[in-house]
Image (spheres, rainbow, N blue to C red):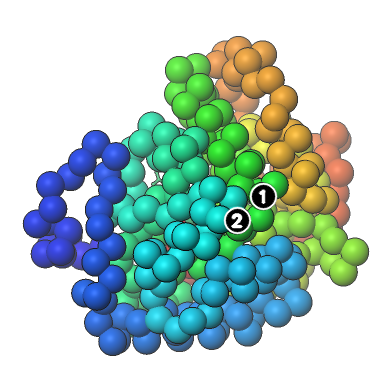
Amino acid sequence: MPLNDPVISEQTPSIDFIIEQRWERYSADEHDIWNTLYAQQIDVLKGRAVDEFYDGLKALDLNQGGIPDLCKLNPKLKALTGWEVVMVPHLVPDDVFFTHLANKRFPAGRFIRGRDQLDYLEEPDIFHDIFGHVPLLAQPVFANYMQAYGQGGLRALKHDCLKNLARLYWYTVEFGLMKTDAGMRIYGAGIASSRIESVFSVEDASPNRLHFDLERVMHTDYRIDDFQQVYFAINSFEELLEATYADFGPLYEKMSTDKHVHGVADILDSDTVHTKGTQTYANSGGRAAS
Ligand code: HBI
Ligand code: FE
């Protein structure tokens, strides 16, 4: 995000960090960057993303051209699952983030990346946040999972388990895969908004692809500066929601003292292995935003 963005700095920050979108202020070039990224991802995600992702894009008319206007997007999303998208200037503090999710508000960055950053970005922009995250918020089971995650996050803060929750988010909402009859499919937004990782995550031989297990994932380290060395796959969104609907109370008790962490390349005896990776890829020098 440009630090001197005049549109942002003229607004007084509020405690929920929400800012107005002011859609009319996006330039033709910014809309064009959205269109470029959109066309590119639609192409690369063919046969690689879960059906629910396309259903969401279609139900929300995200293919209308240009950066979506929240005034048009939110009524459609609200009608489907009760969720809405709100604009924030940048990453918001964890408690603010969880509070938004618990109240069915998805905080999305307002700015869009520049042409020199089409493939790599440090902070989530509106393309990652809306194209990557919002289609699945039109899917009721996934939307419930996101709300449960926000509620769980607020409780985790009180138990000093934030890191565990952040790993769960990372390996599901951002980098999750789904094992379908047609093969491994992408549902994580960090993958779905990245041209290169969209292919890497489902086709490359190097990463491990293991079956999702709630506690296992919450104790697994992650890297933010390269492609993943491990992906966790679910069979369905129902599986994900059921795992997080369990009473987290005892889990938080345990995790507040048990801080063991598995490395990104570890395979445990208890893991269900979908594909064992070769782990030989060189550092690629970056990936798209998550
Ligand atoms: N804020 N805007 C924004 N977007 C995020 O994805 C986000 C955040 N704040 C905190 C946060 N994510 C993470 O700490 C969570 O994964 C736990
Ligand atoms: Fe994200």
Element under disc 2? helix
* Residue annotated with mark 1: 140
Mark 1: few/some/many CA within 10 Å (<14, 14-19, 20+): some
Cβ–Cβ under 8 Å for marks 1 and 2 = yes
* Residue annotated with mark 2: 80
Rendered residue at 58%/63% (across/down): 135
Q: Nearer the viewer, residue 59 or 237?
A: 59
- Which quadrant of the view contains residue 92? top left
> Residue 68: percent from the left, percent from the top?
41, 72
- Which quadrant of the view contains residue 39? bottom right
Location of residue 262 with respect to 111 vertically, above or below: above
Rendered residue at 39%/75% (across/down): 67
Residue type (three-letter) at the residue carrying disc 2: Leu
Element under disc 1? helix
- For residue 92, side relative to residue 289 (left or right): left
Alpha carbon separation for disc pair 1 and 2? 8 Å
Location of residue 68 with respect to 75 vertically, above or below: below
Rendered residue at 34%/49% (across/down): 91
Location of residue 11 with respect to 194 vertically, above or below: above
First in sequence, mark 1 or 2: give its number.
Answer: 2
Q: Nearer the viewer, residue 273 or 128?
A: 128
> Residue 247: percent from the left, percent from the top?
68, 20
Rendered residue at 46%/65% (across/down): 73
- For residue 62, side relative to residue 140 (left or right): left
Mark 2: few/some/many CA within 10 Å (<14, 14-19, 20+): some
Residue type (three-letter) at the residue carrying disc 1: Pro
- Whether residue 282 is visible, yes or no, is no
- For residue 11, side relative to residue 132 (left or right): left
- For residue 199, side relative to residue 102 (left or right): right
Q: Nearer the viewer, residue 96 or 105?
A: 105
